[in-house]
Structure formats: structure tokens, C-alpha cells
Image (tube, rainbow, N blue to C red):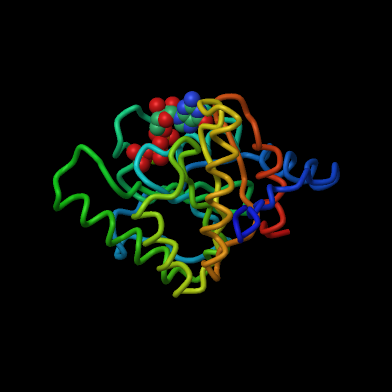
Amino acid sequence: MSANPPITPTLLPDADSAAIEAGRLLFARECQFVWGATDLATMPEASLTEVAFAGRSNVGKSSLVNALTGRKTLARTSNTPGRTQQLNFFNLGDRLLLVDLPGYGYARESKTKISAWNKTVRSYLKGRVPLRRVCLLIDGRHGIKENDLEIMGMLDNAAVPYQIVLTKADKVKTAELDAVLEKTGRALKKHAAAHPEVAITSAETGRGIPELRARLAQLAEI
Ligand code: GTP
Ligand code: MG
């Protein structure tokens, strides 16, 4: 028998119907692309509260922004890692700015370009004053990787709260997802700025989207 009992991470609980409705109403508001930043010099002035979507290339950041806002082509997505090449700011009903970030890790781009994106993304994540929450996307098939841990450490040090979102749940068998979830919960215990709840989502089927909308609506400006 193992000495350590298995850790069952808390899933985003079924939000009550009022919270789900608040999330639905917020994300039904108009959402528009307002700005694309390529480096710190082109970052927009701080205005609204920001929620950023970070994660490895191809994990599904832009697809999640589209699923949350119910718009298929708001953020450009692609099969090819490295699609999003700037920090894209979307104004959601003057209540929240959603920030779709370039991914880290593999991309079919030059080393210089990748290193420049990484630098900008890191500076944004560490030092952006209106940034209230980072949704850190992890592929539900693969779990947390080395470069995710590095970003998590950086966010812990900068005291930027983040929430793990497992993506592409439609592509994983339940037993595999449970194993990834268990491992993720274990890893989170070591990270001070990580929200203890893990969201499970699919941009394809809509799984977990109303619950995540409900959570993010709690951060929006009134
Ligand atoms: P970069 O901008 O390159 O870092 O990628 P990204 O993280 O924004 O990923 P993107 O949203 O462009 O999605 C990458 C690929 O994964 C696309 O082919 C999407 O259709 C696919 N994808 C994203 N989310 C899901 C999902 O929930 N389920 C399935 N089956 N495919 C998904
Ligand atoms: Mg993208």
C-alpha cells in the first residue's frame, strides 16, 4: 500500500446557476480585437482588468478564447504551432480584456523570432499591472511539461495568480484524463500562486466552457 494517499484535485465545481448565468451574460457581450503587441514598447496602456491565456504552442489558447466568446474566428487558430505571433488583446464588453498569447515551445519559426516572443510574453506575465489571472493551458493528453513548470515557477515568484485549464478533453479517454488530473493536482501543491481548482475544457464540444466563463466573470469589472 502506498504511504501517500492519492491527491484528488478539486475540479471547477459546478458553479451555481446564478454564476453560470452571469458568465453567460458577460461572454454574450460584444467582443472585439483591440490591439496586437509584438514587444513591450507596443503594449497598450493599462485600462481594464486583464485575463491572459498562456501555454505551449498548439495547446488551444486561441480556440479557447473563441469557445468562451462563442465566436469561431475571433482569434486565429491553426494546426501549425506558432500561429499566434503577437499578444492579442480583445475587449469583452468593456468589462474585461482577454489576452491571447503566443505559445512557448515548438513553433515553425526562426530561433530569433521565438526568443523574442518568449521574452515579451514573460515580461508581460511578470509585470503587467492589470493582469488579474492567467489561464495556463495544458494539453489534457499530455499533462504538465518542463516548460510549463518553468512558467509556473515564474508566476509563483511574481505572485501572479494562475489557473490550470486542461484542454482538448474530447481527445482523451476518461481514465487517461483522470490520471493527468491526479498528477496535475500533485504538481499544483508545490506552486504558491496556482489556483487549487483545475478546469477541464474542450473547445470542440464546449465541455467546461460555461463553468470557466462563470469563474472569469467573477474577475470582470462591473
Ligand atoms: P499557438 O497560437 O500556435 O500557440 O496555438 P494555440 O495554443 O492558440 O492553439 P490553437 O487554438 O490555434 O489550436 C491548435 C490546434 O488544436 C487547432 O488545430 C485546433 O483546432 C485544435 N484544438 C484546439 N482546441 C481543441 C479542442 O478542445 N479539441 C480538439 N479536438 N482540438 C482542439
Ligand atoms: Mg494561438
- Residue 76 appears in view: no
| Residue shown at the point (56%, 57%) measured from the top left | 186
Residue 28 falls left or right of residue 166 = right
- Residue 96 appears in view: yes
| Residue shown at the point (14%, 49%) measured from the top left | 111
Residue 135 falls left or right of residue 126 = right
How far from the left and from the top, in percent, is residue 52? 49, 54
Q: Quadrant of residue 21?
A: top right
Q: Is residue 82 above or below residue 189?
A: above
Residue sitting nearer the eye, 95 or 210: 210
Residue sitting nearer the eye, 103 or 73: 103
Q: Is residue 16 above or below residue 116?
A: above
Q: Is residue 171 above or below residue 32?
A: above
| Residue shown at the point (55%, 68%) measured from the top left | 193
Residue sitting nearer the eye, 118 or 34: 118
User: Which residue is outermost to the front?
Assistant: 1
Quadrant containing the C terminus is bottom right
Residue 5 falls left or right of residue 54 = right
How far from the left and from the top, in percent, is residue 65? 52, 39
For the image, the number of numbered tags is 0
How far from the left and from the top, in percent, is residue 122? 35, 63
How far from the left and from the top, in percent, is residue 216? 65, 52
Q: Quadrant of residue 7?
A: bottom right
